[in-house]
Amino acid sequence: MSPRSNDSTRGSGQEATPPAGAPPAAKTPRPPSAAGRVDALRRFAAAARRGRGPHLASCAVLLAVAMTAGAVAVGGDGRDAARAVPGVSRAVSADVLVRGDLDTAIRSLQTHVRQQPRDFGAWAALGFAQVERARTDGDPSRYTRAERALARSLALRPGNDQALAGQAALAAARHDFAAALDHADRALERNPYSERALCSRIDALVELGRYAEAAKAAAVADRRRPGVPVFTRYAYVRELRGDVRTARRVLHRALDSAAGPADVAYVATALGNLERGQGRYDTALRHYARALAADDAYLPALEGRARAQAADGDRAGAITTLEQVVARSPLPGPLVALGELYEDRGDRAKAREQYALVDAWTALARAGGVDVDLDTALAAADHGDTAEALRAARAAWDRRRTVHTADALAWALHRAGRSAEALPYARRATATGYRDAAFLHHRGMIEKAAGQDRAARASLTAALRLNPGFSPLGARAARAALEDLEAAR
């Protein structure tokens, strides 16, 4: 899926060893459950509140162990291969990994590479599958396993396009978009029709803020490999440039061409996110319902439904749904959303717990090689250390100059009391035509603080007209600011 999501997004968004031999007599422990991973995050968050610096870094390593305890990483020298489903001797096709059961695919591939350790294509498929699984379960430790599997593929067949495309997807997942672009270009030199490389190239250009080039890349991909993954990215590029009508039309085209339940869930969720961002909550909820009818466990659809419920006034239903989401995948986006809903109802203790879990996740992600500066800036500006938010926002802006990093830097500067300095970045965040109520809210609050009352009224009014329920706390602040501005006239 496109980075819209999450980078959550993100929404969104989008966003898959040893020689054969008998397994040891001892039974391999099962990987921890989602609840076990969240419990490990909670223990780490509590420890982190008691100490910082080197202690925090060492705790992150221990957290990574706790999150993956019993799961045997594939790669390295080949002696730690996971024991998988017996009797599976054929590798799962890489082309269907993202459209099927990833856990089954990973187990099947692990078994296959144990039996056929020189199958470079299977190693590449396994690496990509681990990347895709990490995107859905919020476990960045999988990226190390993906890296090892992809390295094994390249050692067996140097320069093979499957592994290079997998490296592009891995780099994008770690938010190293310059590397993702390089890997994608190298893969496309080998195979100009690699869907995975074409999609990663679009993602990288979008996340580097090179929107005109991303539009060209999307057009090329649409000519070479038309289909759901390309359609959704093409739509997101159009949305970023303010062309919501075309984005909607392309997503409906993608939904019409969806081949199975996974594709239906994926595209219907993208449509739900688009409509929610335009304040069309009933329509968004219908799309999320269609996604969940196709796959009732699809977390992006559950998260989208919760956000639409909250925006439409069903705060209790939104909390219930988000609690289900974070219990399975404690990513920063849903954690902050749940914390703000708790805060909105006056439960500050529960809200603080969610914000602490964001800190825990970002520490784990850093240990897994993920650039989390944008996540840190967005969460810390409103719910953490404003100095840390500003540091992270500047670092994110230095690496990739997108509308999202411009908005994050503008808001971090404003929260640090530097609204005049923030204003050019707030304007840049809205300069492409991309219509996001949170961006307009941030711009309006910055304009108000900078003494530009007329511009502030226009921005805040536009935010609430576009998406009146964009955030339980943000929408309330926008309405209060408008009342202040009207009273001062």
Image (tube, rainbow, N blue to C red):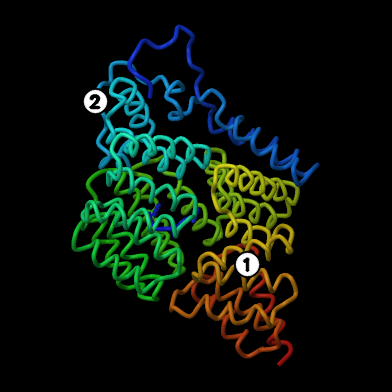
Residue lying at the far top in this picture: please name it. Answer: 25
* x and y percentages locating residue 442 in the rendered image: 61, 74
Mark 1, residue position: 394
Q: Nearer the viewer, residue 213 or 88?
A: 213
Q: How many circles with numbers are drawn on the protein?
A: 2
Tell me what residue is drawn at x 42 percent, y 42 percent. 131
Residue type of the residue flagged with mark 1? Arg
Q: Secondary structure at mark 1?
A: helix
* x and y percentages locating residue 234 in the rendered image: 31, 64
Bin the neighbour count of mark 2 within 10 Å (Cα to Cα): few under 14, some 14-19, many 20 and up.
some
Q: Which quadrant of the figure contains the C terminus?
A: bottom right
Q: Is residue 11 left or right of residue 223?
A: right
For marks 2 and 1, give the CA distance.
48 Å
Q: Nearer the viewer, residue 60 or 192?
A: 192
Residue type of the residue flagged with mark 2? Arg
User: Is any atom of residue 16 visible in this view?
Assistant: no
Q: Mark number for residue 90?
A: 2
Q: Nearer the viewer, residue 310 or 81?
A: 81
Q: Which quadrant of the figure contains the N terminus?
A: bottom left
* x and y percentages locating residue 181 in the rendered image: 38, 59
Tell me what residue is drawn at x 63 percent, y 56 percent. 376
Q: Quadrant of residue 421?
A: bottom right
